[in-house]
Every structure is written in structure tokens, then in C-alpha cells.
Image: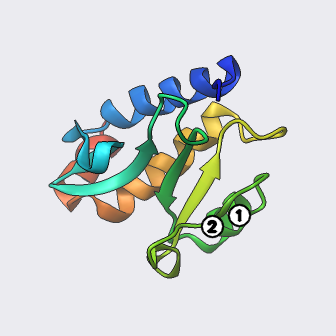
Amino acid sequence: MTVPKSALKKWEKVREFALGLPGAAEEFPWGETVAKVNKKVFVFLGVDDGSYPLGITVKLRDEAAHAHALTSPGAEPAGYGLGKAGWVRIPLAEQGAPAAELLCDWVEESYRVIAPKRLIVELDAR
């Protein structure tokens, strides 16, 4: 399965944005890429080796953002019961997939839900 270049570009932009947030760190549990803050995952970036469709999973507590994310082509509540807690998986290779800028907004929203207050203060000061 080849990963479309446009999807890979979006994935790289989102990954770079996520890792640029205060206190963010990249880890590879279960063989997938995640960005964590304060030892907690705020975005699942999946795998970029083509073994699984490229996508991101974010936690959106804001109802409008959550509803909007679910309107993305192929988007669905995340598996393993995470969907009930507001996690949404958004495929990147689907026709009409969200732009990188919107995905980054959702990553920031997810970060704000999970990051400690002092890091959010640091982010807001930028």
C-alpha cells in the first residue's frame, strides 16, 4: 500500500507542529508514533510505513470541533473505547481530507485538553 504524497506531507506537517508544542515528546509505543505531553498522549500519529492507512487520532472536547472532525471523509470515533472519551480518528489519504492547518488546530485542541496548565500558559504566551 503506497501512501499518497499529499497525505504524507500533511502527516509530516502535523507531526512537526505537535512536536513543536511546549513539553511535547515523540514516542513509539505499540510500533506507532505518538506525541505526548507530561507522559500522556495528545495525538496518535499511527504508522507512516504504509502498513495501515495514514491518519491521526486526537481528543476533541470542544463539541463543535468534535462534530466537525467527524464530518471528515472516513473519520470515526477512535477504537478501544477511546471514542467515548472524545477521541476521533481522521484518515489523511481520503479524498477531501482536512487541510494540514485544520488538523494542526485539532492537534492543538487535543494538546490543550491534556497538557498541564503551566504549558498551556507557555503556549498562549507565544
> Along the line of sight, which residue is nearer the eye, 110 or 46?
46
Quarter of the rendering occupied by the N terminus: top right
Q: Residues within 10 Å of mark 1 (few under 14, many from 20)?
A: some
Could you say which quadrant of the image residue 75 lies in? bottom right
Q: Height in image: 126 above or below 62? A: above
SS type, badge 1: helix
Query: What residue is rendered at 55% in x and 42% in y?
Result: 52
Residue 49 is marked as none
Q: With 84 as the anchor, is 34 left or right in this view? A: left
Q: Residues within 10 Å of mark 2 (few under 14, many from 20)?
A: some
Kindly check if marks 2 and 1 are in contact, taking CB atoms under 8 A apart as contact.
Answer: yes
Q: Height in image: 94 above or below 85? A: above
- Which residue has dot 1 on it? 70
Q: Height in image: 41 above or below 32? A: below
Q: Height in image: 97 above or below 71? A: above
Q: With 34 as the anchor, is 12 left or right in this view? A: right
> Along the line of sight, which residue is nearer the eye, 105 or 47?
47
In percent of width and height, residue 68 lies at: 72, 61
Quarter of the rendering occupied by the C terminus: top left
Q: Hey, what amino acid is under mark 2?
A: His
In percent of width and height, residue 83 lies at: 52, 74
CA separation in Å, label 2 and label 1 = 6 Å
Q: With 102 as the anchor, is 49 left or right in this view? A: left
* Camera-side mark, 2 or 1: 1
SS type, badge 2: helix
In percent of width and height, residue 24 lies at: 24, 40
Query: What residue is rendered at 77% in x and 41% in y?
Result: 94
Could you say which quadrant of the image residue 6 lies in? top right
- Which residue has dot 2 on it? 66
Q: Hey, what amino acid is under mark 1?
A: Leu
Query: What residue is rendered at 44% in x and 74% in y?
Result: 80
